Image (tube, rainbow, N blue to C red):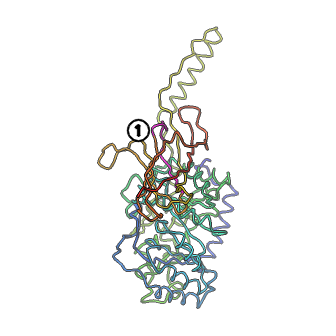
Amino acid sequence: MNINAPLSIRRRMGLEIFRRLENERTEEHQLKQLFWECTLRCNLHCRHCGSDCKKIAGHPDMPKEDFLRVLDSVSAQNDPHKIFVIITGGEPLMRKDLEECGRAIYERGFPWGMVTNGLYMTRERLNGLLDAGLHTATVSLDGFATDHNWMRGNPQSFERAVEAIKLMVQVPDFVFDVVTCVNKHSYMRLEELKDFLISLGVKGWRLFTIFPVGRAAKDPELQLSNEEFRGVMEFIRKSRKEGRIHVSYGCEGFLGNYEAEVRDTFFACRAGISVGSVLIDGAISACPSIRADYHQGNIYENDFMEVWNHRFKPYRDREWMKKDECADCKYFRFCKGNGMHLHDENGDLLFCHLKRLQTPIKKKGMKKMKQKKVLEQSLCGVLALLGFAACAETSVEYGTPTMDFWVRGKVISDDGKALKDIQVIVKNENAYYNDEEGELVRMNDTIYTDSGGEFVSQMMRDGWVDTKKLIFNDIDGEANGGTFKSDSVCMKDMESKQIKKGDGNWYLGTYEYNMEIKLSKEDK
């Protein structure tokens, strides 16, 4: 796609119609989504977090009764069945009374869902939430084990997120999706991650890029280059045409010729138009990503619906955004200055999605290389006419064959019982990485079996499977009805199948290694 080309007549007409509809929606400002920031406590320490989330938060959880009074205000003027409540944080599962909160919301007629990292999700917890009326959920998964755990700051976060996804897949007709914040680490493995999610049974996948606020503001590893950013759009566009999984880009940013190509609707920031929020301190705002500077009131001082009906001018009249690079932009009528969460405390735009897409990609020396190639081909053609084979050359390539691989399996006892929480170490004898201090560290992956005894590990690209093995350790004592002996198996002895072809050169493709192993009890 030529992103720099003028909008087609068809796309411009669609955008104009959509713009008029959005103007009507702005005028009506009918509340459709209500976020509740129920806690700032979190069991992770994510590199990209834009909130003030900690295990022990500086602000206490909001009592559910306070938020329920907000819902009473909302339902007095609206049909609660048409307004979706989204519980967020922090991590909602940090609240022991989350099921009580959900049930009270449901009993008032509001459908509700939640955003979670999955770390504390169990089968019992999910069943309790479903009984409390949980309609939907969003699970964060930012890559395979190495990348996700690096992003989230917890060595078990990938395994637990995958376990949460598996649990949700098993619930008939339960609608959920997976959200991925793409960074420099995960960007190169999007295709594999897509295949992995499909193998788990995931139907919906949303991709976001990380905006530079909070912890992410000064972390260059989290920010994509303009070329990578465009690559994400192309990946989504291609994946949507495949139709194997419903992929879409997040709600932020006008994308020019990618509009209607990478998500289900044209771009519109509906913060304060159909989306509202109640933050942890009672502040009335729009989506929780928009922080202190755009609060419109407080539930402890104001009636929520009074604020919703008569304030929110900065959200509903965005002409104040028409400054700096937006001042003379011909697409401002469609974009309205980008998403509200992409403006700083001074109202300045942090970055423009369209500008990033339209920035020319520098290809150093490409013109000269093409000219040289044309000259070589011409000269070779002349020599061939003269009967010479002087242009024939022998190419020698050097390298080590590599492949991508992931490992899955099941751990059982001698009598066939699934063993939960067995430690599985995928040991890479010849794979290393540099730690934060620059020291060379052997790259191992440590995971744990789920309630069904199953485990899955996605490793980084590597070669020489012969040097890898899996080590199984019982670390939970008597929890499985006894203590089990450690065991190990070499990957070369496991069943394997190729699930993605290589490129015909040194890259061998993607392989899945699978096994079932029995652990024997320790002798007493």
Q: State left or right for residue 212 relative to residue 114.
A: left
Amino acid type for the residue under numbered disc 1: Asn
Q: State left or right for residue 91 relative to residue 410.
A: left
Considering every residue shown, the one lying at the far front of the view is 524
In the rendered image, the vertical position of residue 36 relative to residue 321, given as above or below: below
Q: State left or right for residue 29 relative to residue 443.
A: right
Residue range in magenta is 454-467
Residue at screen point 60% across, 41% down: 498
Residue at screen point 43% across, 71% down: 90
Q: Which residue matches tag 1?
A: 430
Q: Nearer the viewer, residue 309 or 489?
A: 489
Spot occupied by residue 522 in the image (x, y as percentages of width and height): 43, 56
In the rendered image, the vertical position of residue 182 relative to residue 21, given as above or below: above
- Determine if the magenta segment contains residue 22: no
Considering every residue shown, the one lying at the far bottom of the view is 76
Considering every residue shown, the one lying at the far left of the view is 437
Q: Nearer the viewer, residue 104 or 479?
A: 479
Q: State left or right for residue 126 relative to residue 435.
A: right
Spot occupied by residue 378 in the image (x, y as percentages of width and height): 60, 19
Q: Name which quarter of the figure residue 128 lies in.
A: bottom right
Q: Quadrant of the C terminus?
A: bottom left
